[in-house]
Each structure stands twice: as structure tokens, then as C-alpha cells.
Amino acid sequence: MQTQYLFNCGKYQLNLNRPHVMGIVNVTPDSFSDGGKYSSTDLAVEHGLALIAEGADILDIGGESTRPGAPPVSLDEELRRVMPVIEALAAVSTVPLSIDTYKPEVMRSAIAAGVDIVNDVRALQEDGAVEIVANSDVGVCLMHMQGMPLTMQLAPSYQDVVSEVVQFLTDRMYVVTSAGIAIDRIVLDPGFGFGKTTAHNIALIQHLTEIDAIGRPLLVGLSRKSILGKIAGGDEQQRLHAGLAASVISAMKGAKIVRVHDVKATVDALKIVTAVMPI
Ligand code: 8Y4
């Protein structure tokens, strides 16, 4: 049972007593550039605004792909991609903006430009990251990952994936609160697909209530991920229905934020969950 519903993040204080939808805004040349007419910046900003219109509660802006085997992006390139999008959206957004990065320098610039949340797949383990977030008022998502994106899916291995994820998130929560990040600024994430086999991912969903019992709101990202294709079949574009099932199950097991590509469909599905879930 989850009792701590408030999430203090920058200019916002979210009441996570119903599941919230975090819409994904990728700013990568391949995902957005159309060969000239509109810049990848313009397209990403338009996409962000469309997701708000679809009912997104948060926008997650990222400039470096963290999918398995993806090559790293340089600091300069990541800043070039995300900063113009953050600046444009910060001026008009009616919802909190999140920066998806593990680089402390990107966190610093994004916070200065007005983002409200740092979404870090490395859980602030890079040198200087904890201090940058501590010296601000933004919220932070601490995510579990085994290994690093380039190699994490080669041989994921655990004695007990659920207890190891719980241990890691509990440890990181202790480290960052000791450094001055208030507990009500933290959300936690088991990191689906990040150094996990299909069996590991399934075990984490099955035991999500045990991870929820750590006591801070859970964020869950399963949208279009390969685990959905492994179970239901289909490539990335054919995983919407499986992803909706995963979002509904996650929310019913206590997840308070789901990170998704398909905002409108997820908002509708979670309205049904909200309507029937006991308060
Ligand atoms: C198709 C589309 C196949 C996307 C794979 C993917 C999470 C996250 C990512 C997550 C949090 C991804 C940045 C991976 N996943 N942040 N980020 N939680 N907090 N892969 O699960 O979407 S990127």
C-alpha cells in the first residue's frame, strides 16, 4: 500500500493519487528530421504540444537513445538537441517537463532552462549529478539498470531480480536524501528492459507491489519495449495493445506514473483504472 502521494518537482506539486501519464518526446535526428522543411526542434516541440493536448501529465524530453546497443551521444550533441526544445516548451507548457539524461552538465542546463524533473536511468551515479539536483528544487526519477546501454542486454544475471532492484533503489534513495534531496522529490523505477531478460521483466511486474512497498511513487516504462513483442509478437509499431495492458496492470499494482509513446490511448485506459480503483 502506497501512502506517499505528493511529488514535489520544481514549479509543481503533483498529487499522484491517480496514475499519471508521462509522454515521451524524443529529440534525435532519425526520429524527427524529415529532410528539411521542419527542424527536429520544431517537430519535437509540436509533438510535445500534441501530447499535452492528448492529456499527458508530464513530458519527458530526451536527446540520447538509451535503447539496447544504442551508441552514446556526445555532451555537445545532446545539448544541441534538447536545449532548444526545452526552452521552447518551458515557455508554454502547462505540465511539468522532465529531462531524460544521465549527464550532469545536461541536468544543469536543463534545470536552468526550467525543467521540473530529472529522469536519470543511472539514478544520479555520475560524478556531480547528485549535487546538481540537490542544489535545485526539481524532482528526480531514480531508475535501476544493470550494466550500461551498449552491453546491458548481452547477459543479464541476478540471484533474485526483485530483491536486487529493491536493494538498489533503497540504497540510491538513502544516498541522495543524505545529500540533501528531500524524500518528496523522489520517484523510483525498476527500469524495465535495462539489463533484464524477459523472465526478469515478468518477475518485476508480478512483484511490483513489493517494489511499491519501498514507499515512494513508482514510475514504469514498458511502452513499445521488446518484452511486449516477446510475449504478444509484433514489431515496435505493433505493440500498442500489449503496452496498454502493461500500463493498466502496472497502475493496478500501484505504479503512479507510466512513461509512454501513445498518450491518448493510455490516458483513456487509465481513466478506467482510476474509476474502479479503491482510494
Ligand atoms: C521501442 C521504443 C523499444 C522504446 C524500446 C524503447 C525508461 C526511461 C527509457 C524507463 C525511465 C525505451 C529514458 C528506453 N526507458 N526512463 N527511458 N524508465 N524512467 N526503449 O523505463 O524507451 S528509454
Image (cartoon, rainbow, N blue to C red):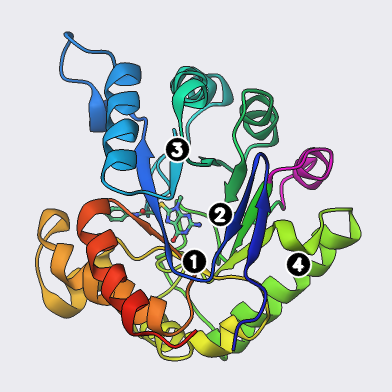
Q: Are marks 3 and 2 in contact (CB under 8 Å)?
A: no
User: Which residues make up the magenta segment?
Assistant: 125-138
Q: Is residue 262 visible?
A: no
**How packed is label 4: few (under 14 Cα within 10 Å), some, or many (20 or more)?**
many
Which residue is tagged 3?
62
| Residue located at (27% from left, 23% from top) | 43
Of callouts 2 and 1, the N-terminal one = 2
Q: Are marks 2 and 4 in contact (CB under 8 Å)?
A: no
Residue 132: in magenta span: yes
Mark 2 against mark 4, which lies toward the viewer?
A: 4
Depth check: give the residue in front, 198 or 11. 11
Amino acid type at mark 1:
Gly
Whether label 1 lies within 8 Å of ligand 1 gets the answer yes
Of callouts 4 and 1, the N-terminal one = 4
Give how far apart the Cα atoms at labels 2 and 4 are: 14 Å
Amino acid type at mark 3:
Gly
Amino acid type at mark 2:
Val
Which residue is tagged 4?
173
Give how far apart the Cα atoms at labels 2 and 1 are: 7 Å
Which residue is tagged 1?
191
Give how far apart the Cα atoms at labels 1 and 3 are: 16 Å
Q: Which mark is residue 121?
A: 2
| Residue located at (48% from left, 80% from top) | 254
Q: Secondary structure at mark 4?
A: helix
